[in-house]
Amino acid sequence: MSTALYELEGVRFTYLGKFPALTDINLTVEKGQRVAVIGANGSGKSTLLNILDGLIFPDSGVVRFCGDVLEETSFREERSNRLFRSRVGLVFQNPDIQLFCPTVKDEILFGPLTLGLDTAAVAAAFDEITAIFGIKGLADRMPHQLSIGEKRKVAMAAVLVSSPDVLLLDEPTAGLDPRTTRDLIGLLNRYHAGGKTIITATHDMHVVEEIADVVHVFSRDKTIIRSGRPDDILADTKFLEEHNLIHIHAHSHDGTTHAHPHQHVHHDHLHKNP
């Protein structure tokens, strides 16, 4: 029996029919797997997540979810659309795209109540998720009044509160303080321990080993150039530098300026002592 959750074969996508965003993507995601997608800006990571969430559809190639082809017609039938949306949740990179309700509480409760989840369970989940993100005090605020970091927490909570089977996360740690980042990683790993599939697009190299079992690296050509274990890929400094995935730091010594690559991989102390 197949354990494949997503299967992508020869997937290509262009914006406006002329700006390539994905080129010949072949990818399988197993149920319960933790996947990280890394790559320079503009390499196609966000586009991939939008395809996995059924928001856009490839120009060519095939995308399967649990063996069924994902195509636009799949979402025209209300029952099928509702079932898929209950199983798959996407947290956008830009929270302003996601937030539209009048208050933070309405925003977080909108998804689970729309999906018809048990009211008592939703209330308990709301209390837990707002406590984790430290946003209980924002419940009656309007989302547009929040800081970017607060908006990101609310957007994340609005997806996680429904506990979907699949979490698609686009730069989830951007704009979060170290303590919240640590809490989020702990929460994601709890979700994974419960059988959830988590697919994360990130530039945050120092969290990759904690949130992924496999890493797919996107190149400037909008395709997957390498896949493997996080420790193997993160150890290849030359490869990371070639694909703009590590920082180049400059420092002066004895009147001479030196530049060297530096990646932030193991910074647990930053999270534990914010």
Image (tube, rainbow, N blue to C red):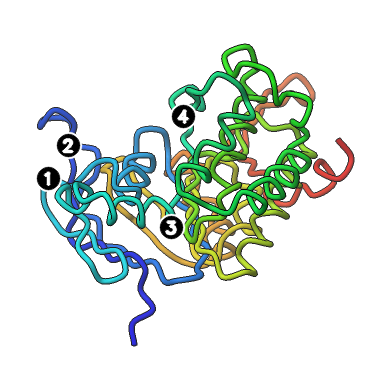
Is label 3 in contact with label 1 (beta carbons under 8 Å)? no
Determine the secondary structure under disc 4.
helix
Q: Which disc is residue 87 wearing?
A: 3
Which residue lies at the image location 68% right of the left edge and 49% below the top edge? 125
Whole-angstrom CA distance, mark 3 to mark 1, is 25 Å
Which residue lies at the image location 48% right of the left edge and 27% below the top edge? 94
Tag nearer the camera, 4 or 1: 4
Whole-angstrom CA distance, mark 1 to mark 2, is 7 Å
Locate the N terminus and report the quarter of the image it occupies.
bottom left
Reading the image, the residue beneath label 2 is 14
**Where does residue 241 sit, x and y in percent of width and height?**
49, 43
Marks 4 and 1, the one that precedes in the sequence:
1
Determine the secondary structure under disc 1.
loop
**Where does residue 11 sit, x and y in percent of width and height?**
19, 54
Reading the image, the residue beneath label 1 is 59
The amino acid marked with disc number 4 is Gln
**Quadrant assignment, res 26:** bottom left
Q: Residue furthest top?
A: 145
Left or right: residue 258 compared with residue 82: right
Whole-angstrom CA distance, mark 4 to mark 1, is 25 Å
Is label 1 in contact with label 2 (beta carbons under 8 Å)? yes
Marks 3 and 1, the one that precedes in the sequence:
1
Reading the image, the residue beneath label 4 is 98
